[in-house]
Amino acid sequence: MMKTSRHPFLDGKPKRMLIDGKWLEAASGKTFETHNPATGEVLARVAEGDSEDIDRAVAAARRAFTGPWSKFKPFERQALLLKLAELVERHFDELAMLDTLDMGAPISRTRGSRLRALGMLRYYAGQAVSMHGETIENSLPGEYMSFTLKEPVGVVGAIIPWNGPLTATIWKIGPALATGCTVVLKPAEEAPLTPLRLAELCQEAGVPPGVVNVVPGYGETAGAALAAHRDVDKVAFTGSHLTGQKIIQASAGNLKRVSLELGGKSPDVVFADADLDAAVPGAGMAVFANSGQICSAGTRLFVERKIYDEFAGRVAAYGKSLRVGDGADPETQVGPLVSAEQLDRVTGYLAIGRQEGARPLSGGERLTEGALAKGYFVPPTVFADVRDDMRIAQEEIFGPVISAIPFDDIEEVITRANATSFGLGSGLWTRDVTKAHKLARAIRAGSVWINCYQAMDPAVPFGGYKMSGYGRESGKQHVEEYLNVKSVWIRTA
């Protein structure tokens, strides 16, 4: 196991921001601390960017976009992405441990993201040489030729959350590099280290100065300045729906493009005819994975009434069997929450659930004994006797908390599954192909997982309905989010 003190990136020096190919202190000279959520220890001090730093980064991105970067051919952009993938693969264990130390996910989980991280980079590399417009036969009288061009949208402001720093960073800079955009990335203040290390690898891969800029700082300052900046052509944001609404408002100044992947309160529906041996761990890890800090977690567990007591009890028992601890321990299955603030939020909802009459079958309180005392640990929790109108069934908790809710028939569960302002993920467990097809069409969510949960691939689009946002990440649709379409007309006679 790689110990914190021996991680090569944690050298005791303050971490600077990357602007125009240079590692700089914040214009204000300010720094902030980032902590290990398993132990509370300070990992590093990080440059605290604000609006002045965002101005510097956006100006650098604009110069790069209109300068040498605009001359790069698709093949050259592909080569950069493939080189970056090679470097990420070479340094992957280091990057995985940095994610674990900074945001708490078990090392088994962060190491398990290897295929996803490398797959995304190589997928975007393929897309770099696959973009094209089309020749369109028009119906105007006379001789006119019409065709379309696909062009990079320009300077992209990317704002990411803390729940998967490595893959979240790749999800934003990958399509920017593929399409010829430039990017200013604002990582989450809770977990800025991996994005900064990945920026070093971008430089090593040969990404030109100003094409990728990373400005750590707080959402209220650096993030807000990036969202409102009049020389940013697009904002790509992942985070809460409340912040997403603020970003839409901030985008109005220059009507910049916006894509949003926001929160969720996803239904996971279990029918009595399901393979329960598969559904129990499937439904459990749909929420307990990453300590529930996943936007599409299946936190509303609808269970057919005839198996409700048995199934909810089995999921609770499964949760109790999971090992909670420091993510750096290879045996850990559930790590800490990312911060003291997130701990307060989740434990607040645990209290609300009990006050509203829900019954905890497992978990329900913070863990404070022994080695867990200094960290932000909440065990896998299953609430029974949950009603649809309870706050724990309506509001995103972002912790390892399941609300188990009984249902009686398929039409009823469709209505209740859709009775939410969100629409990001959803799950369904059944052996009946008719039920599977019916719910796949009826559930209003961007992803429907049948007899599985949270399956993702770089070629398959991911995104939300309703308050879960708009736009898609992954798939060809993701690349289109970073492109403008230009129509060209030529009168030939």
Image (cartoon, rainbow, N blue to C red):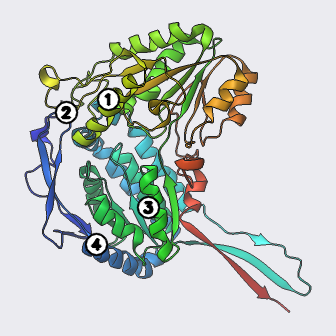
Callout 3: few (<14), some (14-19), or many (20+) C-alpha neighbours within 10 Å?
few
Frontmost of labels 2 and 3 is 3
Whether 48 is drawn above or below 435: the answer is below
Pick the front one: 85 or 33: 33
Whether 299 is drawn above or below 7: the answer is above
Q: Quadrant of residue 267?
A: top right
**Sequence-first tag of 4 and 3:** 4
| Residue drawn where x is 31% and y is 33% of the image | 348
Outermost right residue: 141
Q: SS for tag 2?
A: loop
Frontmost of labels 4 and 3 is 3
| Amino acid beneath label 1 | Ser
User: Would you name the residue on which mark 4 appears?
Assistant: 51
User: Would you name the residue on which mark 1 appears?
Assistant: 108
Callout 2: few (<14), some (14-19), or many (20+) C-alpha neighbours within 10 Å?
many
Work out how far the residue at label 1 is from the one at label 3, CA to CA, in angstroms: 35 Å
Q: Is residue 310 left or right of residue 293?
A: right
Frontmost of labels 1 and 3 is 3
Residue 163 visible in rendering: yes
Q: Horizontal and vertical percent for residue 449?
A: 59, 31
| Amino acid beneath label 3 | Lys
Work out how far the residue at label 2 is from the one at label 4, CA to CA, in angstroms: 32 Å
User: Would you name the residue on which mark 2 appears?
Assistant: 38
Work out how far the residue at label 2 is from the one at label 3, CA to CA, in angstroms: 31 Å
Q: SS for tag 3?
A: helix
Q: Horizontal and vertical percent for residue 266?
A: 53, 34
User: Would you name the residue on which mark 3 appears?
Assistant: 246
Q: SS for tag 1?
A: helix
Mark 1 touching mark 3, by CB under 8 A?
Answer: no
**Sequence-first tag of 1 and 2:** 2
| Residue drawn where x is 51% and y is 11% of the image | 311
